[in-house]
Image (tube, helix red, strand yellow):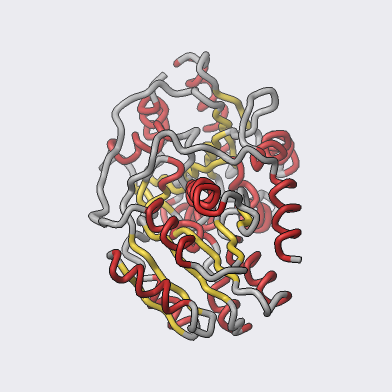
């Protein structure tokens, strides 16, 4: 079926607020949200737990449940407010979850999704949230039955989840937008690698940033041993880089982050600043979107991360948006004492034939640790 059918039925349930974090499995659902404008108050939140909090506030103010969408990797972010606020043993707040099922057992997927896929249904069992599974064979009548069960749960101030398998929705109209930036991310990453000092180590965030760095590092250096690719754990690359920087003050550590990832756990910024690691360079590649999962705007696309970093206590922070500025800051990095943050504004452009790492994550771990030592 088309995602718009699910959205229409959700609207008929009396739900008028939808919040969450984009997911590639739910791409057609996310596109539909943007194109079905005016039917819902739609919020792209910084993380999935924030969406649960927003749903709590929505119910308190209106008496209406909200709908929350996410990739199953986001369940972890949602567990705390779901268990300690929304559960019937606490406040009893109804909400409907739409969850993309990455790493479904028996379906080939990337390594960061495998374990999460195995435990997705078990997590909802543990959280006492009833659920149903949708796939490409789910009929309109079956969907109506699922939502009827969901409605019964919501009417009792409980939660319900719909777990959506890969390829459930038919392709439909795509939501397209342009951020107006000129720099191309992959070219920026290549320039950063070319001009970086020897013995620098790099920690990269999950998504296309790591995939592009992997290709560029192999092209420029003939290997990617100095690169630790944080293939999961969105928003945690900066803290991984901090752990390395503190333990290895003899190494310059560069964290290459994404804007969506920084938003997800922004409390890391003042914490990094408070530790004042002089060997720490934080680069935020900002395309103002969750580009790896469909290019939906982050919901905070006008945030100025350089200004935020300055306010958080970084020793220096700056935003650049052209190649002249890029080349200048790469030279500056060699002498700046950290923690330093550079925000680089880039377009939404990426190659369709971008490869994925050939090695398993543990092989990346071992090669990186050997490089460090």
> Residue 272: x and y, percent?
59, 77
Residue depicted at 47% across the width and 34% down the height: 26
Q: 152 or 261: nearer the eye?
A: 261
Question: Residue at position x 37%, y 23% from top?
Answer: 171
- Residue farthest to the left? 180
- Residue 34 picture quarter: top left
Q: Nearer the viewer, residue 322 or 127?
A: 322
Residue at image point 37% right, 43% down: 350
Q: Quadrant of the C terminus?
A: bottom right
Kindly tell me whether residue 139 is visible in this rendering: yes
Q: Position of residue 242 (x, y in %)?
A: 64, 72
Res 91 seen here: no
Q: Quarter of the image holding residue 73?
A: top right
Q: Nearer the viewer, residue 330 or 339?
A: 330
Quarter of the view holding residue 250 = bottom right
Using the image, determine if residue 329 lies above or below residue 206. Answer: below
Position of residue 296 measured from the top left corner of the image (x, y, whole percent) = 37, 46
Q: What is the count of numbered marks?
A: 0
Q: Residue at x 45, y 50 (%)?
A: 63
Q: Is residue 283 above or below residue 368?
A: below
Say which quadrant the N terminus sits in: top left
Residue 287 in the image: x percent, y percent? 36, 55
């Amino acid at each position: 079926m088309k995602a718009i059918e699910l959205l229409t039925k959700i609207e008929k349930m009396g739900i008028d607020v939808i919040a969450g974090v984009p997911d590639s499995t739910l791409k057609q659902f996310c596109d539909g949200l943007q194109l079905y404008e005016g039917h819902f108050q739609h919020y792209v939140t910084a993380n999935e737990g924030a969406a649960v909090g927003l749903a709590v506030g929505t119910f308190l103010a209106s008496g209406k449940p909200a709908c929350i969408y996410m990739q199953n990797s986001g369940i972890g972010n949602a567990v705390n407010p779901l268990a300690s606020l929304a559960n019937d043993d606490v406040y009893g707040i109804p909400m409907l979850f739409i969850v993309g099922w990455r790493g479904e057992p028996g379906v080939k997927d990337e390594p960061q999704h495998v374990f999460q896929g195995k435990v997705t249904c078990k997590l909802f069992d543990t959280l006492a949230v009833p659920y149903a599974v949708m796939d490409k064979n789910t009929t309109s009548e079956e969907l109506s039955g699922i939502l009827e069960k969901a409605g019964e749960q919501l009417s009792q101030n409980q939660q319900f989840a719909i777990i959506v398998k890969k390829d459930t929705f038919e392709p439909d109209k795509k939501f397209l937008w342009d951020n107006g930036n000129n720099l191309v991310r992959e070219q920026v990453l290549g320039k950063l690698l070319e001009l970086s000092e020897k013995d620098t180590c790099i920690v990269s965030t999950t998504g296309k940033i790591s995939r592009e760095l992997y290709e560029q590092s192999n092209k420029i250096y003939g290997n990617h041993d100095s690169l630790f690719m944080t293939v999961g754990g969105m928003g945690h690359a900066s803290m991984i880089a901090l752990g390395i920087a503190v333990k290895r003050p003899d190494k310059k550590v560069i964290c290459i982050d994404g804007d969506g990832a920084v938003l997800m756990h922004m409390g890391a910024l003042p914490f990094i600043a408070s530790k004042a690691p002089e060997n720490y360079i934080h680069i935020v590649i900002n395309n103002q979107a969750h580009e790896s999962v469909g290019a939906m705007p982050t919901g905070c696309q006008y945030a100025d991360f350089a200004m935020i970093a300055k306010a958080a206590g970084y020793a220096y922070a700056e935003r650049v948006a052209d190649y002249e500025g890029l080349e200048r800051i790469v030279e500056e990095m060699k002498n700046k004492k950290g923690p330093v943050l550079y925000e680089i504004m880039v377009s939404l452009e990426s190659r369709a034939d971008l490869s994925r790492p050939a090695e398993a994550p543990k092989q990346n771990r071992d090669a990186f640790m050997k490089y460090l030592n």
